[in-house]
Amino acid sequence: MINNQCNQCPYNICGRIPAQITFKSDIVIVGMAPGNDELKQKKPFVGRSGKLLRETLLKAGFDQTYYITNALLCKPLNEKNVSREAIQLCRPRLIEEIKKCSPKFILALGNTAISSVQNTFSLKVTSIHGTPIPYSEDSSITVIPIFHPAKVLRNYGDYHTFLNGFLYAKQLYDGCQKKDPGVTQYVLVNESNAEQVTKFLINHEPVMSCDIETTSLNPKKAEILCIGFGITKNLVYIYPMDFLPYIKSIFEDCRAKIVYHRSQFDTAVLQAKGINANADHDTILLHYCLDENVGNHDLKTLASHFLGADNYAEGIDKSNMDKLPKDKLYEYLAKDADYTLQLFNLFYPEVIKDPNLNKLYHQILIPGINFLRRVSSNGFMINIPYLKKFKKELKSELKQMEEIIATDFAHLWNRDMYLSQTKAKSAPQKLNIRSPQQLAWIIYDLLKIKPTIYTEVKRSTNVEILENIEHSHKFIPHILKYRKKHKLLTTYIEGIEDKIDKDERLRSTYNLQVTVTGRLSSESPNLQNIPRDSKVKNLFKAPKGYLLLEADYSQLEVRVLAYVSQDPFLIDLFEQDKDIHSEMAAKIFGPNFTDKQRTEVKSVNFRIVYGGTAFSISQEFGMSLREAQMIIDEWFRTAFKAKEYLDGCVEHLKSKQPFITPTGRCRRYGLVTMDTNQCNEAKNFAIQSIASDLTLLSAIELESLIEPYNAKIINLVHDSIVIQVINDKNKVEKVMELVYNIMHEIPIKWLDTDINFKAEIKAGFSWGDMKKIE
DNA sequence: GCGAGCCTCCC
DNA sequence: CATGGGAGGCTCGCA
């Protein structure tokens, strides 16, 4: 099938699959391009992707009568970035092939296939996955975009979505109706109907959706433009903001439960306007219960996947909604509210029929999301004069260091040599010290330094490598120092400064639906990765007249390991409140262990719960593999039940059954690959998950108990709770006692165990200067 | 302007 | 090949 087009194609030299014999088929499957296996066998989809594709087709109920081809006949030079030119050149051939098959459905796998089939580069598989669209060449044929199986093999969490795509395709093939969200109608509230509509909404039962449109994505700055209430499929009532008293009365008196999508934002905005809104339900959390694998639970994506909604948000800028004409704004709001309610009616029955998910949703996620909104709203006080001073210092130090690069190290940069010796397409006149590519050229090509350690990234310039070659050139330590300071300035000084509110407080967004294990995530800014360096932590302070308390669960994950494995050695250790690092060191090295050995064991104690290997330990401490292996073997010989537990997790993974924790968390591995990464994840899941839930549950429980003592929770970091409390001796003592007791009791209550969970409390006026309190 | 890749910070 | 879970800043190539 070589034609004139091929002569112009950049991939013409790479080898191709020859023309296939076409045959009539109702289903045509279009992939991307051949890989090595495909080229060898001269057939599309014969490798790992092909195996997964065939298995999934079978699982979805498709028999063997489909025709498989690719958007490209040749192997691309760079699979991650396929040339648009090549797609267009190969397209006429694909169209011809499809025509000969005369299919009813085309399954387009991945972006390259979709681009070719639909003759456009604007469709992305992640947003239109599983949404049927008419074929660009013949609208009587339906195209269904689905992930490329290679994507699923790289990220097995996508398997659920992938399988759902095929299942839906099969339903359509069998003649089922397309999903249809219906036509959303809205009633605009005005002077004449406000009274009546409000009364109607207040008496409506049992559930209604609520969504608001605002002028900003920051709840503190956002002005509400309009509020919509969805009461039944396709029917939404919209209040413009002139009706605030009516709106208020709905939130105060309504009998229905209110469902939001990403309730933190809407309820925070309403709270800022003096409306006491709390989330009864949240579709983002419901979907998270049903699928912890997808990181994105965006309303638009869910509405498209589950309701068959079109791309109704196209061209709408969420941060600039006041620029939108009113009719467009209302239509958009109405759809958001309508789809939220429709999704709720779809997801909620699914969640409550599973006792674990039901418990997780009602007892943790819903109380949790309202709690986290309040933690965020409390905010963490920043020492602004100190921040300004710190910033100035760092800026001048960085400038000095850049000048040294420009003068003393100028000879290390040769633009032309760099361009000719690397694949770089462009390069600056002066060296950019922040560019890993340029740095790699200097280290590996110009200076020809050979690091003695291995890294996953080729020609890496990361800390490990730089420290390894620190003495090879005086330029290297300079880079290390620069990187450190630059990180400090950009991420922790400027990144924080940008986000301080008018009242000198920093408010992070805590997400409850991001991680697969149930840990929280924190963003804008991330308050969970503030450097331990006290110089940075001292940016965070207690307000005047207040004190900071920080309560940490000590060795939380090891204690959870003791719980899940019921290991007698570990349980006994915690029961007797002994120092786990010393006890373990004594078991491994005998009673006369050195401080260095204790440090090594301490590190192993933490790594064990992540599935750490002898290799990584030997790298960290520069010991032999044999020595590292000995430590691990002895560790597991001592805590043999822990070993059994971790091995059991791998067995459980093999069984393809979900992992479930006592708090109702569920980890489903749709595609079980049994690779190292997945096995380690399986070992770690319950430990990390239970540990983070214990902290969250303790914090939720504490919130109302410490409130009478003028104390508020202002941050959470995985196993620690940061509290601000009025600086009054009696009140501080009372709060500390409560914290200590609750953190001890929550595991007893939730895990039904007598394993001794213990908190450690520190106090201070500044986060970088906290002293342990006995 | 966007996304991938790299790097660095946390538990 | 070789420890799990995150956020975010920067560069660079592409559109």
Image (spheres, coloured by chain):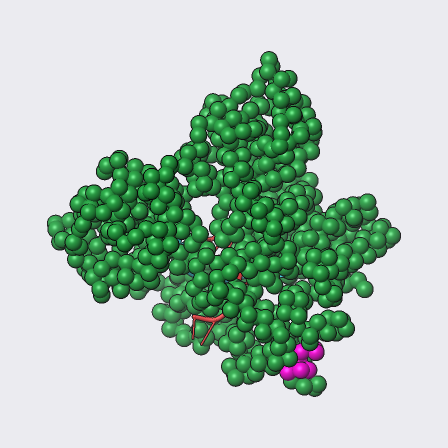
Chain colours: A green, B cyan, C red
To which quarter of the image does residue A175 belong? top left
User: Where A313 sits versus A751, above or below?
Assistant: above
Q: Can residue A435 be seen in this view?
A: no
Residue stretch in magenta: A582-588
Looking at the magenta stretch, what is its main secondary structure? helix
Q: Can residue A256 be seen in this view?
A: yes
Q: Nearer the viewer, residue A550 or A493?
A: A550
Q: Residue at x 37, y 36 (%)?
A: A177
Q: Outermost residue, top direction? A: A192
Q: Nearer the viewer, residue A54 or A277?
A: A54
Q: Residue at x 44, y 27 (%)?
A: A183
Could you say where residue A43 lies in the image, as x and y percent from the top left?
Answer: 22, 59
Name the side, left or right, on which A59 lies relative to A639: left
To which quarter of the image does residue A772 belong? bottom right
Could you say where residue A222 lies in the image, as x and y percent from the top left?
Answer: 59, 33
Q: Residue at x 55, y 49 (%)?
A: A289
Q: Which of A659 and A317 is in front in this view?
A: A659
User: Where C13 sits versus A120, above or below?
Assistant: below
Q: Residue at x 51, y 60 (%)?
A: A657
Is A586 covered by the magenta stretch? Answer: yes
User: Where A648 sits versus A764, above or below?
Assistant: below
Is A91 covered by the magenta stretch? Answer: no
Could you say where residue A313 lies in the image, as x and y percent from the top left?
Answer: 44, 34
